[in-house]
Image: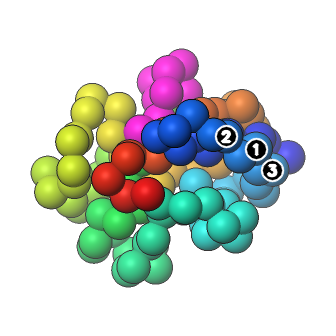
Amino acid sequence: MPTVIYVQADGSRTVCHLQPGESVMDGALDNGIAGIKAQCGGGCTCATCHCYIRGPWFEQLPAPIQDEKDMLEYVWQPEVNSRLSCQVKVTDALDGMIVDIPAQQA
């Protein structure tokens, strides 16, 4: 079962074990991770699940679909490694992935 580490802006970390195929957003919601609101429920229409995926995991992710790219234009402080957590599916290869939660969303 892959491990995902959610990091808050204050540096606090929560380690979660997610099922392969589960989204980073679902894992955050299931584990009470602050800052991942997911108001649209994973429909890629609100950007309230914005996060930053650290390397080397970011480089392993498939490219975002156009809808995600469009939504990322509206997030607070977009970075090169910005993603919508509803669009990031966990795989065994992503074990240990570190996901930073933007301070603005806390």
Q: Amino acid at mark 3?
A: His
Q: Measuring from the top left, give residue 8's x and y in whole percent.
A: 53, 44
Q: Is residue 7 left or right of residue 78?
A: right
Q: Nearer the viewer, residue 24 or 60?
A: 24
Q: To which quarter of the image does residue 32 belong?
A: bottom right
Q: Disc 2 or disc 1, which is closer to the eye?
A: 2
Q: Where is residue 3, by image quadrant?
A: top right
**In this rendering, does residue 104 appear at all?**
yes
Query: Disc number at residue 15?
Result: 1
Label 2 sits on residue: 13
Q: Residue at x 32, y 53 (%)?
A: 104
The relative height of residue 41 versus residue 77 in the rendered view (above or below) is: below
- Which of the pair 35/19 is nearer the observer? 35
Relative to 54, does residue 106 appear above or below in the rendering?
below
Kind of residue at badge 2: Arg
Task: Please give the name of the residue rendered at 15% of the width and 57% of the height, measured from the top-left corner.
Answer: 74
Outermost residue toward the right?
Answer: 1
- Is 61 left, or right, of 22 in this rendering? left
Identify the magenta region.
52-59
Identity, as a three-letter code, of the amino acid under mark 1: Val
Residue on which the image places disc 3: 17
Residue lying at 49% horizontally and 27% vertically, measured from the top left:
54
Callout 1: helix, strand or loop?
A: strand
